[in-house]
Amino acid sequence: MHSYSVRANNVLSFAVSVWMVLCAMATASDFFHKADPVVSVKLAKVERFLRVGRNDEAHLAFEIDADLTSVFSWNTKQLFVWLAAEYSTPKHVKSSVSVWDRIVESKEDAHLVLPFVRNKYKLVDNGAGLRGNVVNLTMGWQIMPRVGVLRKDNVTFPAAFTLSEEYPEPPQPQQRRTGVYAHPR
Amino acid sequence: MDFRGQKLAERMYQVILVIAGIIAFLAGYLSGSFDTMSYIFTCGVIVAVILCVPDWNYFNQHPIKWLPIDEDHPDWETKYKPQMEAKGGAKGGKQESKKKR
């Protein structure tokens, strides 16, 4: 404490210690935060359902009304919201395919009202097991805090929709990727 | 800065930063804004640096009192230094021993 540099060092290091305590308290306060999200997800339409090569593909559209405003606490930076389609086939007992997601950056944008939203990522089965299959929809969200631990939560809508027994359109061959080296035949 | 000043400075920044932290947390939590907490605490840190780091007058209210120079406690400059120099001094002897071989 006899020189400027020692005093500056002591003041700043003690400031960092106090700041760490504040961050720990902010994280602890998150555990007392009560959230009651109101989520409703329905299938709006199966826009396409076909077989491409060896795999089934479904192009979906959803009706989403999710009020995640109460999930935001004072220590929340943003939410990562996603929609997963879950189903079971004889080949793979549990399949979960992410079909849509969104980053919610503020409390004002946290009420998602999307009457007709197309999937960002089409539902592709590993195999041909989608015909007549019952699909669950799960909306999940990860709560990214400013400081502290990442938490997540989800709501599942079991048997949200059933895909048709027959393909409404003829199958398509798997498109060869362009720009990839192909073996000469 | 004297010794009491150093103790005062240490106690001052501790009190300022802890109070700033309490105010910042309450303000941030009650207003629901993490940024408010950051700003208020940063202001507290700046206040602590301004008040505790420079050598202000209030840190020099208790200067060290040295004992007076008398027969029992003579001044080194006037009494012992001439004697050392007359002997050849610590300087000369040591420097000669460090000659290159």
Image (spheres, coloured by chain):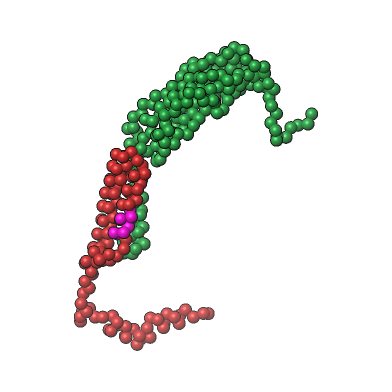
Residue A100 in sight: yes
Question: Does residue A140 appear left or right of residue A13 in this picture?
Answer: right
The part of the chain drawn in magenta is B45-52
Towards the viewer: B30 or A86? B30
In this picture, is A49 found above or below B3?
above
| Residue A25 in the image, given as x and y percentages of width and height | 33, 40
Which chain is depicted red?
B
Chain A: drawing colour: green
Q: Position of residue A92 (x, y in %)?
A: 57, 20
- Looking at the image, residue B51 lies above or below residue B33: below
Q: Quadrant of residue B64?
A: bottom left
Residue sitting at 35 percent across and 59 percent down? A8
For the point 35% across and 37% down, the residue is: A74
Find out whether residue A55 is within the magenta segment. Answer: no
Residue B21, image x, y percentages: 30, 47
- Compared with B24, A67 (above or below) is above
Q: Residue at x 28, y 42 (%)?
A: B26
Q: What is the tally of numbered marks visible in this picture?
A: 0
Residue drawn 29% across the image and 65% down it = B55
Q: Residue furthest bottom?
A: B86
Query: Can residue A84 be seen?
Result: no
A86 left or right, relative to B28: right
